[in-house]
Amino acid sequence: MAGEDLDELLEEHCASIGALTRHLREVILAARPELTERVYRGWHGLGFHHPSRGYIAAVFPGADCVSVGFEHGADLPDPHGLLEGTGRRLRYLRFKPDESAPTHEHLIEYLDLAVA
C-alpha cells in the first residue's frame, strides 16, 4: 500500500493530476489485484510488481499528464497504436485529465499483455 508515500509524491502536482494518478492506480489494482505497489521517489513514480513477472509497470505523474510506463513495453504488441516512446525497452500510455484516449479499458488490456 503506497499511502503516505503516494501523498508525498503528489504534493507538488495540481489537483487534477493528483486525482488522475490516484484513479489510474485504482484501475490498475482493481484489474490486477495480485500486483503490489511501491513509490519510487527517485523516479517520481509508483511502481507495480507481479508475483512472478516482477516489475511490470509504473505510474508517473507529470506537469500536464500522467504516464503509465511498461517495463518491457517495446516488446508488447500495440493493437491500438497507443504506446509512446522510442527507447529500447520502455513504452508509455499517456493520460490527460481532459482527454478520453487512451481509455481505462486500453490500460487494462495493455496490463494484461504485460503480465502474459
Image (cartoon, grey):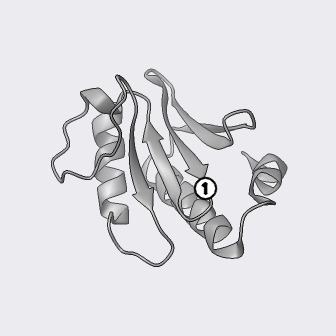
In x, y percent, where is residue 49?
A: 54, 31
> With 101 as the anchor, is 5 left or right in this view?
right
**Front one among 88 and 11:** 88
Q: Secondary structure at mark 1?
A: loop
> With 52 as the anchor, is 111 left or right in this view?
left
Label 1 neighbourhood size at 10 Å, few (<14), some (14-19), many (20+)? some
Which part of the image, by quadrant, shows the C terminus? top left
Q: To which quarter of the image does residue 115 belong?
A: top left
In x, y percent, where is residue 31?
A: 42, 53
Which part of the image, by quadrant, shows the N terminus? top right
Residue 36, placed above or below residue 83: above
Q: How many numbered marks does the figure carry?
A: 1
Residue 3, placed above or below residue 13: above
Residue 3, placed above or below residue 44: below
Q: Tell me if I can see residue 19 in this picture.
A: yes
Q: Residue at x 46, y 79 (%)?
A: 98
Q: Residue at x 55, y 59 (%)?
A: 26
**Amino acid type indicated by mark 1:** Gly
Extreme residue in the left direction: 79
**Front one among 21 and 109:** 21
In x, y percent, where is residue 6?
A: 75, 51
> With 113 as the anchor, is 111 left or right in this view?
right
Residue corresponding to mark 1: 62
**Front one among 55 and 1:** 55
Q: Tell me if I can see residue 116 in this picture.
A: no
Q: Residue at x 64, y 70 (%)?
A: 19
Q: Residue at x 33, y 45 (%)?
A: 84
